[in-house]
Image (spheres, rainbow, N blue to C red):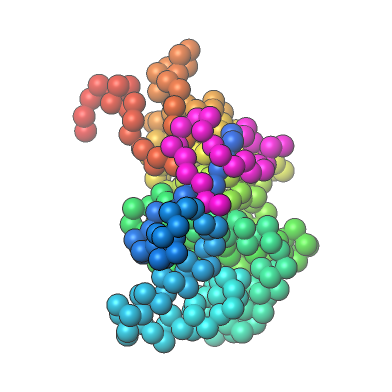
Amino acid sequence: MSQTHDHSWGHSKIFKPSFSCHVLSLPTCKYGVNTLHTRSVAEEAEGVEVEDDVWLKMLEEARVDVTVEPILSSYYHSTILSHKSLASALSNHLAMRLSSASLPSGTLCDLFVGVLESDQEIMDAVKDDLRAVKERDPACISHVHCFLNFKGFLACQAHRVAHKLWSQGRKLLAVMIQNRVSEVFAVDIHPGAKIGSGILLDHATGIVVGETAVIGNNVSILHSVTLGGTGKVSGDRHPKIGDGVLIGAGTCILGNIKIGAGAKIGAGSVVIKEVPPRTTVVGNPAKLVGGKKNPIKLDKIPSFTMDHVSHLSEFYDYCV
């Protein structure tokens, strides 16, 4: 059953596992999906929640879209309506987007299908990512719109395949996918990086994530964000991002530091020290809003609200 929440702490309905050994965790939840497409007659008649199957929603949305724009019929048929499953459609779409003259789409599609159809955990994360984009990004028209056109979503799913291959020791293939994603989508995520589910990479251009970075569940990241090293160390050298974190555009988080669950990083910040859970930091170098001794605690999960500016006007007394 689909669930709703009010984005507040302590109101999550369904809990999901986190990278608990790496990051500070917070309860995470499934959530209801707002959509511009009309609910089915059965749903309206019964007046009850029904199981939320993203693939069935996508098929319904695609059929509606081709009636509105018949010119897209062939495109929608080849990318969505002719496929038996989300895994098949995603494999085909990623292969078409990432192929090149020397790297045929058929070869890539077989590779992607082999991973996605054998790993239910990845497919569950794909669905959570689709829901996350639709829920949090007001520019997202529908799940189909995200699936076909949002490069942050596509880059994240290609990374999930690359990470699986990396974990299996197939590092040459994993790095090849990373390179193609970087060239096509301008998103550079090392295949060794660990990424949770319910991820929103908004706009996504210029995102860089290092090899030993860990990103928890239900994290929202804007464009031009770097999760990098300091350049001084090897081994485990990249940030660990807790669940529910919101990272603003142009932010650099450097070194093996923890960003606590539910923290918010203001746009353009440079973060080189750990950030406590449910706090806000901003600036270069980043400072805690409210001060180190008494930082303001957030009462809502920032990656869900996508509120980039709350409390900042109280902290700064000037306008630019």
Up-down: is 270 above or below 314? below
> Quick one: 178 or 294, which is closer to the camera?
294
Q: Residue at x 58, y 65 (%)?
A: 158
**Residue 287 location, x and y as percent?**
43, 25
> Quick one: 99 or 124, which is closer to the camera?
124
Can see residue 229? no
> Quick one: 304 or 99, which is closer to the camera?
304
Q: In this figure, what is the number of numbered marks?
A: 0
Which quadrant: the C terminus?
Answer: top left
Can see residue 86? yes
Q: Main secondary structure of the magenta part?
A: loop
**Residue 81 location, x and y as percent?**
49, 80
Quarter-of-image position of residue 270: top left
Q: Residue at x 25, y 21 (%)?
A: 317
**Residue 14 location, x and y as percent?**
59, 42
Q: Residue furthest top?
A: 293
Q: Residue at x 59, y 34 (%)?
A: 26
Q: Residue at x 42, y 83 (%)?
A: 75
Tell me: 254 left or right of 133.
right
Q: Is residue 301 magenta?
A: no
Up-down: is 176 above or below 311? below
Tell me: 126 left or right of 142.
right
**Residue 145 location, x and y as percent?**
40, 67
Q: Residue furthest right?
A: 169
Q: Is residue 4 magenta?
A: yes
Residue range in magenta is: 1-25
Q: Residue furthest left?
A: 319
Up-down: is 117 above or below 188? below
